Image (cartoon, grey):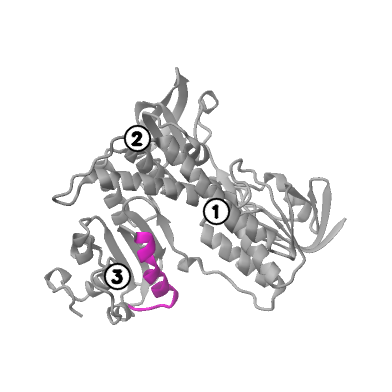
Amino acid sequence: MEEFDYVIIGQGSAAFSAAIKANDLGIKTAMVGSNATEGAVLGGTCVNVGCVPSKRMITVASFLHEVRQNRFAGIDAKVNNVRYREVVEEKDRLVEKFRTEKYKNVLDNLENVTYVEESGSFIDKNTIKAGKRELHMKYALIATGARSQVPKVKGIERIKYMTNEEALSLKELPKSLIVVGGRALGLEFAQMFARFGVKVTLLQRSDRILPNWEPEISSHLREYLEEEGIKIITNVDLKELDEVDGTKQVSLAVSGKPTNFEAEQILFATGRVPNTEGLNLKNAGVELDEKGFVKIDRKMKTSANSIYAVGDATGQPMLETLAAKEGSVATANIFGSAKKEINLNEVPSAVFTDPEAAMVGATEEEVLKGEIKCACNPITFELVPKASIIGDTRGVIKILIDNKTKVILGVHILAPHAADLIHEGVLAVKHKLTIDDIIDTVHVFPTLSESMKLAAQAFYKDIGSLSCCTE
């Protein structure tokens, strides 16, 4: 039996962040790396089958769309053909580069960390079996992530379907595609494939896409996606699936009315399930919730005092940067005197459609459930000078404030580069800034980030009647 102070199960962003922190602290650590998600090798989901490859493909599709738009007078641009296989192969090389430079090489330089390339499972709360090896430890960290969830629909066994993994590995484009799911992943992939020339139909169970976001964001984004030719159907109830001569057939009800759709391919973007089944967590006294996610307290400790858990294996929100933060904080909590907590209200989220959507803090619905009286005043990007300058006025920004104190409670943006713009809102929410603090801050002109200041000014003035640089 091998002795360690710390054993980390997982090899994604949460696990790596924890390993780096443990190495800095001089902790004798083992990282047990293997994934239930087939495509997520060393580095986990984000670098292999998540953020890195998908955002690369989205970027290429957006570039293609931009060229074809010809939105500036006097310029004619054409794309003669798209060699999709080469696009995918270049994406694969980028993934390999990131995996090597950001994960393999980093791991090789962690002198206090031993990498064990096996699946790990608990024998008891202080012992992990990894292949033929038994690792005894004082503390353990569960960072095994999650994988795509596919609904149990009648006939699912009769069809060959895709998740994000298979969709990113396609070497040839289908002529038509049904995307099931209208949240971040489904929307991103629907637009990406549509911009590559695929006929896309998106099916969403709830009454709107992005159901947990502000209604203004959802409605505007749906409008923009439909303008690009994406057919969006909401209030969908899947009934049965079938495949005939390679064509996927979907029987469903829309607001209770039976109907059918068919396409060459079908992609499920219907949530994620945790990679916890094979860990034998009962042996360690670790409790799971009804969906199989690990239960943790605010310091990321499980029901077993010596075992912590972080990242996607603990449930929503499932974000790469949050997982990394949790891995570092959990490790510091285990081996340091300070016991930190992560305030999820300060954690931003983004959807990489075009335009992008980003949010931080509370939604209006959440605030109205409490005792605070809030105020909000959404403005469109037609009022932002830079948007007109770049020829793209799509979008809206909504700041939510405490009506009494003017403290910013939430920021919600739909706009080009919203995922970059949101960070001023993150700092505002984190440090409880007021709209007056934002107004008092000098912003560069012309920039899209001025939208934050304009949205703050809109609580006091009609910004449509102001000059460009009015304080």
According to the picture, the residue beneath numbered tag 3 turns out to be 452
Q: Amino acid at mark 1?
A: Phe
- Residue 292, compared with residue 251, is above or below; it is below
Q: Label 3: how many residues lie within 10 Å, few (<14), some (14-19) or many (20+)?
A: many
Is the C terminus in the top left, top right, bottom left or bottom right quadrant?
Answer: bottom left
Kind of residue at disc 2: Val
- On screen, residue 392 versus residue 282, left or right, reads left
Q: Where's residue 140, x and y in %?
A: 73, 60
Q: Earlier in the sequence, mark 2 or mark 3?
A: 2
Reading the image, the residue beneath label 1 is 98
| In front of the other: 363 or 160 | 160
Q: Residue at x 27, y 79 (%)?
A: 439
Residue receiving disc 2: 200
Residue 435 is situated, as x and y percent measured from the top left of the image, at 30, 77
Q: Which residues are magenta?
A: 418-434
Q: Which quadrant holds residue 20? A: bottom right
Q: Confirm whether residue 457 shows in the render.
A: yes
Mark closer to the observer (1, 2): 1
Instruction: Work out whether 20 lies above or below 81.
Output: below
- Looking at the image, residue 420 sits to the left or right of residue 300; the answer is left
